[in-house]
Image: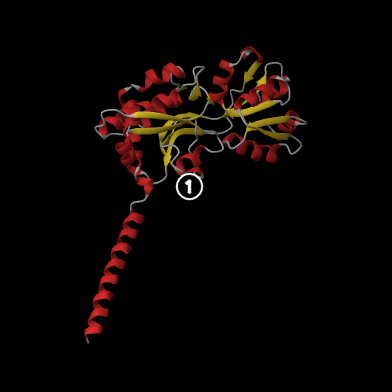
Amino acid sequence: MGSMRGVTRRARRYLGIGLTLGLAGLITWAQPSSAQTLERVAAAGVLKIGYRKDAPPFSFETEAGEAAGYTIDLCRKIAADVKEELSLPEIALEYVAVGTEDRFRAISNGQIDILCGAATATLSRREVVSFSLPVFITGVSGLLRADAPSFLREVLAGRRPTVPPRTLVLQAFTDRTFAARSNTTAEAWLKDGLADLATNAEMVTVPSHDEGVRRVLEGEVDAYFADRAILVGLVAQSASPDAFEISDRFFTYEPYALALLKGDEAFRLRIDRTLSRLYRTGEIDSIFGEHIGVPGEAVRALFMINSLPE
């Protein structure tokens, strides 16, 4: 009997340990690392900002090697509000350069806390990361040489009918080569567009926007497709801005947003609170004006719609 009592006591002890471990596992599962960004920042006093080096005027690197741009300044405002919310004496900003191929993976693996680049919020991307309120709206356009064939320029610029007859497009695209940067929404659109409109046209991908601009300038491709706002920034920074023409026509709708770890609602709320305040108070105008200019009607409407009340 004594032996049985000993076994029972041991069984209860092991069962208790097992339940404790099991509950701990459930608690860990219920509170994943995806909800710990603010806690990590509070503990370390560091916010890790991911940025693109080649997406002016949104995110780029200055000659001094510093991160700059419209979305970079938005993230600095967010960092200041995080510092205040967490009552931190100081908050250090760690800037991490990322590319189009690894920017979302850098969020998932904890390399960065927030992506402050020129990222379009899409449904497929929301499968792997979360997005803030929109911060800009643009669309894919084409970059051509200023001396490109007039017919091609007219079709891409929309100076022909808004939806050109198929024969016009086929004629304009015949034996043409178009480029887009890899791992972008422009690449996805161009693949689908060419397959639907002109099977005899060729598409190539490039590793950077600078490479796409160079290929247009040197006549290696007939047009380079990217978000129009980025194309404007690239041309403005080029040594020969008059050598290019940018299509006025938008082929897609691209809402930009800041990306963060999927499921981190506390951090996303902090980000959206900052953005809403900037939109609501009009403080966004000076930030936008410094990097881009006067907001157009579409962007102004975007700010108004996303000026969420507390």
Q: Quadrant of residue 107?
A: top left
Taking 298 as reference, is 272 left or right?
left
Q: Residue lying farthest front?
A: 3
Q: Residue at x 34, y 59 (%)?
A: 25
Residue 39 x, y percent position in the rendering: 31, 41
Q: Residue lying farthest bottom?
A: 1
The answer to whether 275 is drawn above or below residue 293 in the figure is below
Q: Residue at x 28, y 75 (%)?
A: 11
Judged from the image, the secondary structure of the residue bearing numbered disc 1 is: helix
Residue 248 x, y percent position in the rendering: 58, 23
Taking 64 as reference, is 211 left or right?
right
Residue identifier under label 1:
127
Q: Residue at x 57, y 36 (%)?
A: 185
The number of callouts visible is 1
The answer to whether 167 is drawn above or below residue 285 in the figure is below
Residue 147 x, y percent position in the rendering: 71, 16
**What is the crowding at mark 1: few (fewer than 14 residues within 10 Å), some, or many (at least 20)?**
few
Residue 175 x, y percent position in the rendering: 78, 31
Q: Give the image's coloring scheme.
A: secondary structure
- Is 184 in front, or is 62? 62
- Is 107 in front, or is 17? 17
Taking 255 as reference, is 251 left or right?
right
The answer to whether 236 is drawn above or below residue 2 in the figure is above
In the rendered structure, which amino acid carries the disc numbered 1? Glu
